[in-house]
Image (spheres, rainbow, N blue to C red):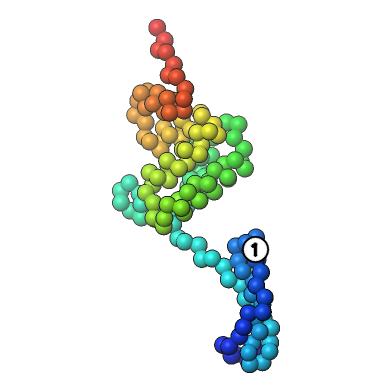
Amino acid sequence: MCGSLENRVVDSRSADEGRAIRRRRLCANCDLRFTTFERLEEQTLSVVKRDGRTEPFDPAKVEVGIRSACKGRPVGADAITQLVAEVEEGIRAHGPTVESARVGALALERLRPLDGVAAVRFASVYKGFEGPEDFEEELRLLGIDSPTPLD
């Protein structure tokens, strides 16, 4: 290529499953054809922790929490991967910065219909349950009546 900055687009197509645009270009100076790719720049996501610190969003942390809650439950790896992707998508829709409580709420919201027991486990850590009444409230949110106390 001659180094000229003057060129024109001769063809544009979607590439990389719609995540990029492939452009065929023609140098106006030497008639050389070349290809460029345009990709969307992913927005960096940040999470504001309870203590006020801000750190980059790490989907692996969400996945570890979900996998831990689902341990021993009939929830497949694909379902967990999909759930984590949905949480990340929800965070992106919210904006570049989100509070950690919102991340937990999104994860719990998507875990409830998947597996009630896993949802209660996740909620107990995420919400910091302190007593049986916290478990009863979470069961109520799942639409499950609280068990009657044993006599």
| Rendering coords of residue 85 (x, y %) | 54, 48
Observer-nearest of 74 and 28: 28
- The three-letter code of the residue at mark 1 reads Asp
Query: Is 46 placed above or below 21 here?
Result: above
**Which quadrant does the N terminus fall into?**
bottom right
Q: Residue at x 40, y 7 (%)?
A: 151
Left or right: 99, with 67 as reference point: left
Query: Is 75 placed above or below 100 here?
Result: above
Left or right: 74, with 48 as reference point: right
| Rendering coords of residue 116 (x, y %) | 51, 29
Tag 1 secondary structure? helix
Observer-nearest of 44 and 55: 44
Q: Is residue 56 shown to the viewer in this render?
A: no
Query: Label 1: how many residues lie within 10 Å, few (<14), some (14-19) or many (20+)?
Result: few
Residue picked out by circle 1: 16
Q: Quadrant of residue 106?
A: top left
Q: Residue furthest left?
A: 51
Q: Residue at x 67, y 79 (%)?
A: 10
Q: Residue at x 42, y 25 (%)?
A: 140
| Rendering coords of residue 26 (x, y %) | 66, 84
